[in-house]
Image (spheres, rainbow, N blue to C red):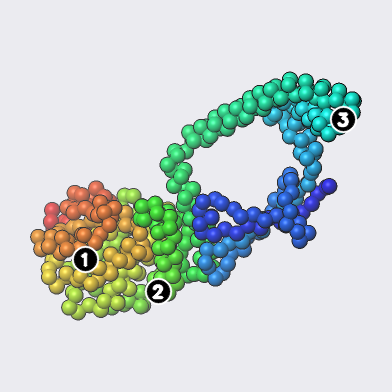
Amino acid sequence: SGPASLKIIYHLTPRSDMLGFLECCCVREGRSEPSLVTATAITEKTRFDPCGGGFEERTVAVEACESSIFDWLQSWSSKPSSPYVTRILTWPFLFSSLGLLAWSTTGLQGGAVQGTWSTVAHLILIPAWLTAHALHGWMRQTQSATLCDATASNEPPAERTKAQTTALLFARLQHLALKYPQAEFDESTCRRFLSARKGDVDAAARDIQKCMQWQEEARPGNITPDDIKKELATRKAYCHGYDKFGRSIVWNFAGRHDKRTRDAEATISLILYSLETAIKAGKKNGVDQICAVFDLSGFGTKNMDYEVTHRLIQLLTNYYPERLGKILFLNAPMIFNAFWSCIRSYIDPATYEKVQFANKGILCSSIDPAMFPQEVADMLQRVA
């Protein structure tokens, strides 16, 4: 009946978005009706629910032409992709069907003759049409499989699945960016949480929302040096240089931390400031992980701060997953082994694999000596 403008409105819940299910409703002139349409142009507008809840509405305007069954048959039989024999047999099969219908509903002799010819035609046309149609389907399936194989050769299936899952998770949670404008959220965030949660999409989605809520409330990226002057003056943690993989390095000096005199909240603020500073520095190299070096020179019982260590592990697990690319323990004394045996059970196995007890040679193999802080370079020079 000519061009018509239709609106297709579908709602994506977290569950349906991940599984790819769409609940569609075709609306034309205020009435719901099934239509056989041929889309000629599509425009899309997206609206995210600012209140959250995993709801998303997209309105798609489709410029289309409604068509009758005869128009559809005409377009289908004239497709270049259809076998020539199928296109030839389509119209004879239709008219012979109409003839058989006429023969079955009339008692006239002419109707009977027409019915006889229709019956004969069907005995010939039905097997031929079905054979041609089956051959056409087989050819399309073969072509599709060949195309999929060619596409798969350019990208490993496992990597393609991981990328698709990350993209789906990002689309599922994108509305949270409006609810938590101060929080950091991108596909890299989804990729890190998926990796940390061992591919569990629901767990990753839940923890990302908790992380964004925490970032909105704590705002670790807004901590300034003026906020932690006293902690910075201790020089027990600071960022300096990059390792050989482009990761920003946080240098920690455990011997300068005294659990008897420290302010726990101020120490946590120093940790957050150091993490955020290192992450921002690493992004300049296109790297979203950091390297942490712990100089354990002079480590003793006064430095065994289980409370701060436990909170550090919780921060890294819940809000900074997969941010640590490498952890180096330098100059570890024997007493540190007792402390390490108590805390290592709380560390994720994947993170534990990144831990390495280092000497000068191992440190230099991971970090160029030119990147050492002056006090570390001097210390290593004395050891040599």
Earlier-in-chain disc, 2 versus 1: 2
Residue 106 to residue 181: above or below: above
Q: Nearer the viewer, residue 244 or 326?
A: 326
- Residue named by callout 3: 107
Residue 218 is tagged as 2
Q: Nearer the viewer, residue 17 or 190?
A: 17
Crowding at dot 3, Cα within 10 Å, few <14 / some 14-19 / many 20+, comes out as few
Q: CA distance from mark 2 to mark 1?
A: 26 Å
Give, as a three-letter code, the residue at label 2: Ala
**Residue 85, percent across and down?**
72, 23
Q: Is residue 371 visible?
A: no
Q: Is residue 175 visible?
A: yes
Query: Could you say whether the residue bearing mark 2 is in a helix, strand or loop?
Result: helix
Give, as a three-letter code, the residue at label 1: Phe
Q: Nearer the viewer, residue 6 or 307?
A: 6
Q: CA distance from mark 3 to mark 2?
A: 87 Å
Residue 227 to residue 145: above or below: below
**Residue 54, percent across and down?**
52, 63
- Residue named by callout 1: 253
Give, as a three-letter code, the residue at label 3: Gly
Image-based side of 11 in relation to 1, left or right: left
Q: Residue at x 21, y 53 (%)?
A: 356
Tell me which corner region of the image, top left, top right, bottom left or bottom right, holds residue 89: top right
